[in-house]
Image (tube, rainbow, N blue to C red):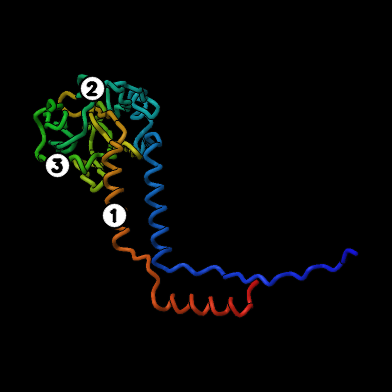
Amino acid sequence: MVSDAIPKKKKVVTHPPLPLSPSLYQFIFRFCSIFCSISILSQPIFIGLLYSSGTHDRSLASSINPSHFPGSTNMEGESNQSGEKKKRIAVGPWGGNGGSAWDDGSYNGVREITLVHARCIDSMRVVYDKNGKPFVGEKHGGVGGSKTSEIKLQFPDEFLTSVSGFVAPVVHGGSPVIRALTFKSNKRTFGPYGVEEGAPFSLPIEGGQIVGFKGRSGWYLDSLGCHLSRVQTTRVLQKVQQRLKRLTSSVSLAPKESEDAGFKATKATAQGGSYY
């Protein structure tokens, strides 16, 4: 004869989730933030282009070449020693139509910038990095200017990530020129140099760096544009690895005595059958 009795449920003792130590929470948070920074490396360069006519008349903005406004970008292909194509983006220039066009091209990065200025940016000369060695570019502009400013980057750890400035004629009715410039790196801000008057422009960059300049010049620096390239992934990965190494050495994962006591109390309660 088959018994219809329902078997009794066995008493299952389960342990409650153990609380994580604050140090472990901190470790997880920092690790996730570093992981996110690594994932950003695979994203394309983000460029923000800002141009405003400021307080000046619309005739100033209309006198500037339309190709100087946002959207005047083009892709370039440059082969490295391994034969791989490296994408370069050319943006700008911003400024007036005076003078003659020039283009320094694109390099591995920027080492130094020398500006001569007074009421405007009179001239500009850039020292680039070409395969690990300094390469002095040509001087662009005139012989005027009473102040000389030198920008020296801590290459290769420091690189340019932004350039901004102002565009306006030096005299009423004249052609617009670069009146002021400000540069930003991944570590510092340089400037402003010159006089901040006229129509402002700005080129902030995320995930990339400035590796060359182009523009127009005559008696002054009439206009300025840039060549952009993606930041070298290996350089950033080395910094991330160093941060991870410091993080794991500074954060201890061992539970504290108070946490050990809490664990023992929780275990004793579970054995008493209060949790199922």
Q: Which residue is mark 1?
A: 245
| Residue nearest the observer in this picture, 208 or 113 | 208
Q: Amino acid at mark 2?
A: Gly
Q: Which residue is mark 2?
A: 98
Can you give x and y, in whole percent of width and height, for residue 272 in the image? Answer: 61, 80
Which residue is outermost to the front? 1
Can you give x and y, in whole percent of width and height, for residue 48 in the image? Answer: 38, 37
Can you give x and y, in whole percent of width and height, for residue 120 in the image? Answer: 19, 36
Q: Amino acid at mark 1?
A: Lys
Q: Which residue is mark 3?
A: 152
Q: Is residue 118 above or below residue 105?
A: below
Task: Work out how far the residue at label 1 is from the one at label 3, CA to CA, in angstroms.
Answer: 30 Å
Q: In the image, which is nearer the foreground, mark 1 or mark 3? A: 1
Q: Earlier in the sequence, mark 3 or mark 2?
A: 2
Q: Residues within 10 Å of mark 3 (few under 14, many from 20)?
A: some
Q: In the image, which is nearer the foreground, mark 1 or mark 2? A: 1
Q: Earlier in the sequence, mark 1 or mark 3?
A: 3
Does dot 2 land on a helix, a strand or a loop?
A: loop
